[in-house]
Amino acid sequence: QMSKGGLVSPAFDKGASMCGIVGYTGEASATPILVEGLTRMEYRGYDSAGVAVEQDGGIQVITRKGKVAELAHTLGHFEMRATHGKPSEANAHPHTSCSGDIAVVHNGIIENFAELREELEGRGHTFTSQTDTEVIAYIIDYLVRKRGLTLQEMSAVVAAPFWSTIETKQKAETKRLTYLRNLYSSLLITGPFSILLGFEGGMMALNDRLKLRSMVCAEK
């Protein structure tokens, strides 16, 4: 029996015609909702599948190479097409923070993936896949767990607003955003992307600054 929430996502690939992310948080069991979401989007041509759901006070991650049915047979679902590297369970999403308490899926392209990976390896992170989404998970881990930033502060680093937008804020907010952007400038993610974070008790969504990968939120 899976608990309250979960995430599902196929990621973007240059050879794919479509992409998207599905997530759920609520009182109902997440598994059947995520399975339905995966099944509806399977025509997009996944090469691997995975799921991250709340269970037993933490986040359980299961990944499988191949079709949704392979994952459905195991239970739980968080689906994603591999963005970088060959189809494999290692490249399948989701990816988690080092502490395992935040799971990440993303749709789009991290254009500065190589630079970010080099930066994180210099900070001691060891990568286990070829996908760019793993970079996002480790950036979030570094900012939240090691540097003590809140999720809101982390979002102002990862998906920082334009300088022109920062200048229109109230004085205190302009000062805060300027400080964060200058201090962690090397961890800014560039490219068209939507990011969905799953953690115990909720989810958080991030867009690139131009909103090139839009998301829709609904409540039932």
Image (tube, helix red, strand yellow):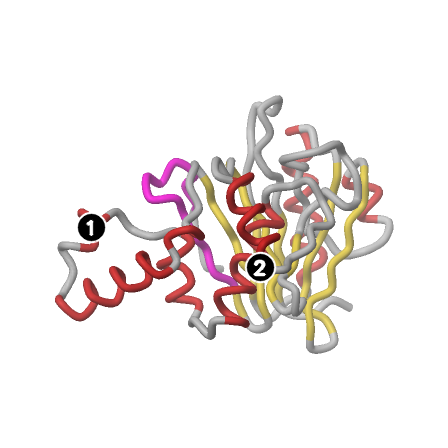
Disc 1 residue type (three-letter): Thr
- The main secondary structure of the magenta stretch is loop
Q: Which mark is residue 110?
A: none
Left or right, 137 with respect to 52, comes to left
Instruction: Identify the secondary structure beneath mark 2.
Output: loop
Quarter of the image for residue 84 reads: top right
Instruction: Identify the secondary structure beneath mark 1.
Output: helix
Can you name the residue that lies furthest to the front here? 122
Asked if 34 appears above or below 30 in the picture, the reply is above
User: Bounds of the magenta span?
Assistant: 203-215
**What's the residue at 51%, 37% (across, down)?**
108
Can you name the residue that lies furthest to the bottom here? 57
Left or right, 93 with respect to 75, comes to left
Distance from disc 2 to disc 1, alpha carbons, whole Å, reads 30 Å
| Location of mark 1 (residue) | 165
Picture coordinates of residue 24, whole percent (x, y): 57, 58
Quarter of the image for residue 16 reads: top right
Picture coordinates of residue 116, whole percent (x, y): 52, 46
Which of pointers 2 and 1 indicates the residue nearer the eye?
Answer: 2
| Location of mark 2 (residue) | 123
Question: Residue 195 versus residue 187: which sits nearer the camera?
Answer: 187
**What's the residue at 42%, 51% (across, down)?**
186
Q: Is residue 161 magenta?
A: no
Disc 2 residue type (three-letter): Arg
Q: Quadrant of the N terminus?
A: bottom right
